Amino acid sequence: MSLISALSLKDLVCLQDKIAAQVSQFPSLEEAAQCYMTILYEELYDSIVLARLFIMIPFGNLPKENQEFAMNLARSAAINERIEDQTMVLSLLASRGAKPEWNDRRHSKDHKGIPMISSDYIDRIPMMSRLLKQLGAGIDWIDNNDTELVAKSFENISGVFYVRDAQSEVDQQGRKIIAAQDFVTTHSIKTVFGIGGCYLGTSLFFSTIIFVREYLDRSIVERFMLQANKFKTATFQIAHEGKIFT
């Protein structure tokens, strides 16, 4: 097992079982997510350059360093005064990749969290905008930041974020979906994809984002939905107990 495109049905089942068995052993969602990303990377290292898992969580529930990052990001756009404790932030929870600095979320310089301040702000970030839209949440809920609306938007979310060609694919405004083209070129990134899901009864939404060095058809990517569901099932209890960060 090393190339995603070469995975057999048996390989997929073994991978799903391994994820379900191992992630259930941890006391926090962060540790379980790190284990999940590590398994994916180590089993599929010929394909995966970087694997990350993000979670949508209120600003007030973030560790201090993450709050500072989100606030500074909002400050750079002159909208920091709009951040409140209940403002949702898509936060990096786990990371595993080809470079040592990619193996700890705390070492991330630019992607610790993106505050969901307004639909206009998120629409300026092509990858985030497509991620939310393709996974089914959309971005209209952001402007109200209503807890019940957020939960309703996420309750049935289960989909695939998919960019077949990271180097050339653009949105309707002609912007590259993957803006970091230096990263794409340096590491020969071909396809980028992610799987999202929501813990029922909560507004906790998670998504993986996987950068790979081979072109993958959407049908292959969709096979990863079951393993993401396995992760969600195995971590359901700690998510509901609010045991997010280590």
Image (spheres, rainbow, N blue to C red):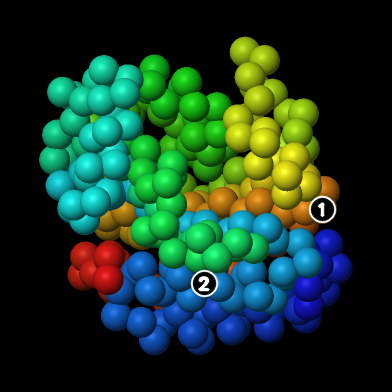
The quarter of the rendered structure image containing the N terminus is bottom right
How far apart marks 1 and 2 lie (CA) works out to 21 Å
Residue 168 badge: none
Q: Give the residue type at disc 1.
A: Glu
Q: Name the residue under label 1.
A: 214
Left or right: 86, with 240 as reference point: left
Write the residue at 51% across / 60% down: 101
Quarter of the image that includes the C terminus: bottom left
- Residue found 50% across the figure and 86% down from its top: 21
Q: Position of residue 200 (x, y in %)?
A: 34, 58
Q: Which of marks 1 and 2 is nearer the N terminus?
A: 2
Q: Is mark 2 on a helix, strand or loop?
A: helix
Residue 75 visible in this rendered orientation of the protein: yes
Q: Is residue 236 above or below residue 77?
A: below
Which of the pair 66/145 is nearer the observer? 66
List x then y, in percent, for residue 54: 43, 53
Mark seen at residue 36: 2
**Is 32 situated above or below 73?**
below
